[in-house]
Amino acid sequence: MSKKITLKLIVIGFLGLLLWIPLLLEQGVIYERMSYRDQVTHDIASKWTGNQTITGPVMILPWQLEYTEKQWNDTTKSYLLVHKKKQGQYLLLPNQFDSQVNINNSTRNRGIYQIPVYNGTVEMSGSFQRTKLHKYQQDLEAKYKGSLSWGDAKLSILVSDMRGIVSEPTSDWNGNSLSFAAGSGLKSSTQGIHAELGSWADESETTHFFFNLQIKGMERLMITPAGDNSSISMSSDWPHPSFNGRHLPTDYTVEDTGFQANWKTSPFAGDLASVLKECQNSNYCDFTSHAVGTDFIDPIDMYSQAERSIKYGLLFIAVTFMLFFLFEVLKNLQIHVIQYGMVGLALALFYLLLVSLSEHIAFIWAYVIATIACCLLLGLYLSAVLQSKARGYWFATGIAGLYGLLYMIISSEGFALLMGSILIFTTLAVSMLTTRNVDWYQLSRSTPQNSPEGEESDLEGKTIQA
């Protein structure tokens, strides 16, 4: 291949790399708009309610242990029995915990941004048993050789953002109604509500409960499976759930009208005993790390789609430049480097146009308008560059087809990588098969001349001018 063609290929390649700069700048614009959206999210959360994590009910039982201990007395030179007291609290979780969550979703608008919010009901039912309470009492009394007495118990429900508690919960505690007050009653987690139970340790062996909590929040709702055996069911009209937390649902259904998900945990899977022990010993209660729930998200929003599409920008420019060069070879045309650059800039401008339009109209219509605008511009321009209206508009139609394929790629969550790989492979295969008979060493033996419109070079028997 001659030095002239080699030099042109190098210049075209360098031009393609230069066009990477506007693509990177446009990608920076996308990230900047995404940061603006995050700021709006935080602002709405500060005025509405943030993500919610609900834990409970947790029973808080204060205790006092009276015991005697031998101490050496320097005056009498003997051991004396000293009466002592030790105080603390015991945290008890339900033996059985069931929760039914029903959520209604909507959006809050701030300027051009929409943030998903929700409100609904969280029903909790189950039972407490005193078996663990008896064992804890026996262990302490055996250790200190003393007598333990229980104080008045509290029932606590932890809520990560109390502004989301719409009203006082309705309750049924062994047939009685409880009155709740603000504050969780735990030093380490103050957000929540609590109810006074009185001397619960002296009541019946098993206590059944039911609570109905009206809640609101934004983007995420998590429920801690607080029981030894827990069952959580969540339903919503949001069609794009992202299940989150320590456990995935045991079963779920997702439809266009919403989703239904169920979680079940056993004492072995829950492992809340270690959390309770740490909470009692160090006043650090990390219940939220065991929560399960859902993020209410749009998995392919306008910015993520635009960000995914711009990753193919350099590939589109490379494909276009390759086709231009093939036109030079196969149609014996001359295309100036500046004309390469103009077309490359038009292709790069597509993504900026796409982002700006998608902030005001639906993404699919923004994509259609941006595609039509860029393809019409390319069709008019290339009609002159390629010396034929038919060639120009066929070329623009091919670009439109590539954009259509790109939309299928960025709209697909599970097959994006596969479809992108197929696009790259197909592009390479077409270029290889199209030029498989070209004798690249003979392309530059004479100066390329413009051939009459519609005339094709004989690649088999004649020297191709370039």
Image (cartoon, helix red, strand yellow):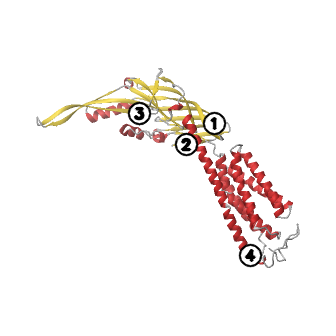
Q: Are marks 1 and 2 in contact (CB under 8 Å)?
A: no
Q: Locate the N terminus by quadrant.
A: bottom right
* Residue hosting label 3: 186
Mark in the foreground, 1 or 3: 1
Q: Position of residue 62 (x, y in %)?
A: 35, 29
Labelled disc at residue 107: 1
Badge 3, how many Cα within 10 Å: few under 14, some, many 20+?
many
Cα separation between marks 1 and 2: 21 Å
Front residue of 247/297: it is: 297
Residue underneath mark 2: 244
Q: How far, Cα to Cα, is label 2 from label 4? A: 59 Å
Whichever of labels 1 and 3 marks the residue nearer the N terminus, that label is 1
Contact? badges 2 and 3 (CB < 8 Å): no
Mark 4, residue position: 4
Amino acid under disc 4? Lys
**Relative to the observer, which residue lies in front, 245 or 15?**
15
Frontmost of labels 3 and 4 is: 4
